[in-house]
Image: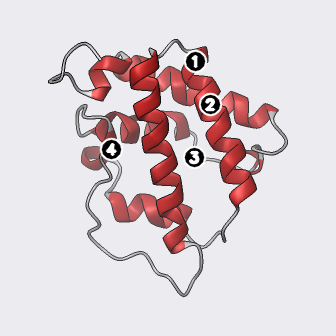
Amino acid sequence: MASASESLYASMGGFDKILALCERWHERCLSNPDAAHPFEHELHPHHDIRLAAYLAEAFGGPALYSAGYGDESHVQRLHACNGVHLELDEACLSEFNLALTDVGIPAEPASLASAYFRRATEAQRAYSTADSPVPDNLPFNHA
């Protein structure tokens, strides 16, 4: 990162670079049979933009997701009750790391973004079944 005070968002290159990352990750997952399943069903038509808005906010950029789409509880509910799927998670995390490289995110911010994405993916497991409902008003999951 350029300086200790620079956000991860800025060191990654801002919204356009994060959107490119989301689009590339989506492409990579679709081309990998081990990672494709979540992307093979009908997604929201603006999935990549919404994910980029979420990650931009998580990485210290503008509050685009919470201002326009929902809160952390909403995000968790979108992913809840799908069971624990470690192999799928690992395949998707691997593709995320490759997408970071593909779009040219520098090494240090890529490492931080990767670590955040892993923590966020693992945290979603808390709501993997119907008997573990997502609580209201979860704090936003910042990196």
Q: Position of residue 56 (x, y in %)?
A: 34, 33
Q: Residues within 10 Å of mark 1 (few under 14, many from 20)?
A: some
**Which residue sits furthest bottom?**
131
Q: Is residue 123 left or right of residue 81?
A: left
Q: Position of residue 55 (x, y in %)?
A: 39, 38
User: In terms of sequence position, does the residue under pointer 1 or pointer 4 come before the other?
Assistant: 4
In three-dimensional space, the C-alpha distance between marks 3 and 1, rounded to whole angstroms, equals 26 Å
Relative side of 82 to 70, left or right: right
- Amino acid under label 3? His
For the residues marked 3 and 4, what is the alpha-carbon distance in whole angstroms? Answer: 15 Å
10 Å crowding of disc 2: few (<14), some (14-19), many (20+): many
What residue is pinned by disc 3? 44
Q: Quadrant of residue 15?
A: top left
Kind of residue indicated by mark 4 = Tyr
The secondary element bearing badge 4 is classed as helix
The amino acid beneath tag 2 is: Trp
